[in-house]
Image (cartoon, rainbow, N blue to C red):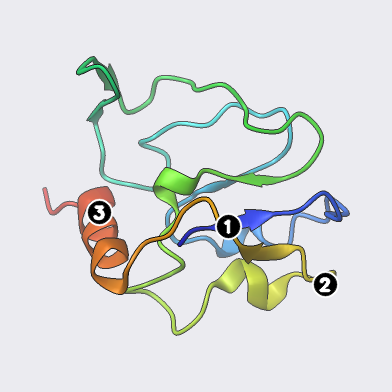
Amino acid sequence: MAIMITDECINCGACEPECPNTAIYEGAMEWTWGGGTSLTEVEIDGGDVIPGDAPQEPISEEYYYIVSDKCTECMGFHEEPQCAAVCPVDCCVDDPDYRETEEELLAKKDWLHQAS
């Protein structure tokens, strides 16, 4: 599963630099698929292909947020999710809406960080 940030977030920003996939963004900030990954383009739902640097709508306007489709729970990088390890208020928790196996998370990591 992916990690999510709850509304108990105090917006300290400790989590953001810890993410190896650049899946964490400050509230109201646009995000990109390519940021922190090797993706130059992505096929999205419906079959459309968008550039990796195309800005995407923020998921939260108030709090730091995690893009679930970029979150690998730090699999392949660290033993545990680094955002949760550094969060001073324990608001980086498992997201029950995104359940993935270890194999799926590692495949996502490989997709995000494809060798050029």
Identity, as a three-letter code, of the amino acid under mark 1: Asp
Estimate the x, y position of residue 99 in percent, counting from the top left: 43, 59
Q: Give the residue at x 73% y 36%.
A: 27
> Which residue is at a point 21% across and 60% down the rendered structure image?
107
Residue 38 found in image quarter? top left
Between circles 1 and 3, the one closer to the viewer is 1
Which of marks 3 and 2 precedes in the sequence? 2
Q: Are marks 2 and 1 in contact (CB under 8 Å)?
A: no
Q: Which mark is residue 95?
A: 1
Mark 3 belongs to which amino acid? His
Q: Which residue bears the numbered disc 3?
A: 113
Residue at disc 2, secondary structure: loop
Q: Label 1 vs label 3: CA separation?
A: 23 Å
Q: Is residue 48 left or right of residue 36?
A: left
**Camera-nearest residue between 104 and 28:** 104
Where is residue 19? Give x, y as percent: 52, 60
Nearer the N terminus, badge 1 or badge 3? 1
Tags 1 and 3 touching, CB below 8 Å: no
Identity of the residue furthest to the left in this view = 116
Mark 2 and mark 1 lie on one chain; the one further toward the N terminus is: 2
Side of 39 relative to 17 (left or right): left
The residue drawn where x is 23% and y is 70% is 103
Q: Position of residue 83 (x, y in %)?
A: 62, 67
| Residue nearest the observer in this picture, 73 or 86 | 73
Tell me the quarter of the picture where residue 72 sits: bottom left
- Left or right of 7? Residue 18 is left
Identity of the amino acid at label 2?
A: Pro
Residue 50, above or below 24: above
Give SS at disc 1.
loop
Report the residue marked by disc 2.
Answer: 88
Image coords of residue 69 (percent x, y): 41, 45
